Amino acid sequence: MKDLSRCVHQPEPPMAGFRSLGVGTERASTIVFDNAKAYAERSLRGPEGYTYGLHGTPTTKTLERQLSALEAGTHTVLVPSGQAAIAVILLTVLMPGDHVLIPDTVYPPVRGFCRNYLEPRGIEHSVYDPLCSPDELAGQFRPRTRLVWAESPGSTTMEVQDLPAILSATRPRGVMVGCDNTWATPLLCKPLALGADFAMEALTKYVAGHSDLLMGSVSVTDAALYRRLKDTMRMLGIGVSPDDVSLALRGLQTLGLRLAHSGRVALDFAAGLQSRESVARVLHPALPDAAGHSAWRRDFSGASGVFGVRLRELADGAIDAACDTLRLFQLGASWGGTHSLLVPMRIANDRTVTPWNGNDTILRISVGLEDPDDLWADLTAFFDRLETGMARP
Ligand SMILES: *Cc1c(COP(=O)(O)O)cnc(C)c1O
């Protein structure tokens, strides 16, 4: 072999005796085959075999299997973001003329996807009250309703949905149910075990856990449904980078400890903030007055570190000025990382079914891994500033 060939064809190092606790990062566009027959018959390998880098390498399959086990599912697909995971589910289930129900509390870009992408293509949607009864939900079914989407707890306002009740309405009518489980992660809730057809995660948040990558997952308990998801992904040409997956695999190893810590500190903070002058209501599923608290107690094994604080009416500019006092909390959207975040959210434009009266500013707080005393000092300064000059009742 001459030098130019030596540059391209790497030697194979000995593998005997080598074992690592890390998962190798296997990158590939091309998969090579042992002989011409194996290449010609590559499609027989099916969605679980190796045929092309886009469809998976040992690195991606490691994370898929780990998530399938955690979700109490049989198969998982990985996609480039949480939003992509929801889009892939809807595009897999829905054909022109079909109808999907989404909760009023849905992650807002999902409403946009239904309105601006599906609707012009003849796929209908309507919005339901996340806390409605199974009869009220069934009352919104149309002849071609195929899917009820759930998100529990709901974005920003944190209503916990009663998934078994939703299933009691969908099952007799053959309607599928998918659940966005990003807040709980599979460690605190398992929608597939409760009977959902799809459990979806924005791995971007807690699973990856370090605010440095985007990824989503969809887990199912049915091999045929898995094949349909993989078909949609193949048609759209989407997959994930093994480099990103190796970071997610690393994040997942500490998920349990991170969640337990953030969950405990967040609940302390949520309880502590209830007595603040400027607070109308703390929105945290574990507080006894929370919307859907009994469903949370029954279906979840704990709470993660994200909660909301609904504020009373405040002077103009008060929130912006209070945000300027923050030293550790950062202002940012994508929660679930090691850094604590706080953002003022205005939600009135994202609610069309459940009426929203009064001040619609909610602080969304994501507790990270900094020292809890430092974080509490930051929050105390924030609320002191917010309440400067506020009339005491
Ligand atoms: C962030 C988030 C998503 C979207 O995840 P991305 O990876 O940012 O696209 C979906 N659902 C919920 C509940 C989220 O918080």
Image (tube, rainbow, N blue to C red):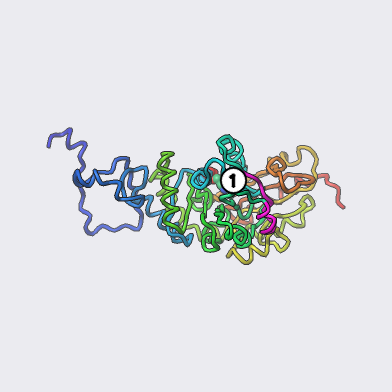
Mark yes or no: residue 211 visible: no
Q: Residue 200: percent from the left, percent from the top?
A: 52, 52
From the viewer's perspective, tell me whether residue 267 is left or right of residue 182.
right
In the displayed structure, does residue 179 sit left or right of residue 313? Answer: left
Residue 16 in view in this figure: yes
Task: Determine if the magenta segment contains residue 115.
Answer: no
Where disc 1 sits, the SS reads strand
Residue 98 image offset from top left, x and y in percent: 56, 44
Relative to 392, say whether 8 is above or below.
above
Mark 1 neighbour class, 10 Å CA radius: few under 14, some 14 to 19, many 20 or more: many
Q: What's the residue type where badge 1 is placed?
A: His
Identity of the residue furthest to the bottom in this view: 298
Query: Horizontal and vertical percent for residue 183?
Result: 58, 54
**What are the residue bounds of the magenta stretch?**
125-139
Q: Is residue 28 above or below residue 369?
A: above
Q: Does residue 129 belong to the magenta stretch? A: yes
Q: Position of residue 311 (x, y in %)?
A: 75, 48
The structure residue drawn at horizontal position 45% and vertical position 48%, both measured from the top left corner, is 229
| Quarter placement of the N terminus | top left
Residue for badge 1: 99
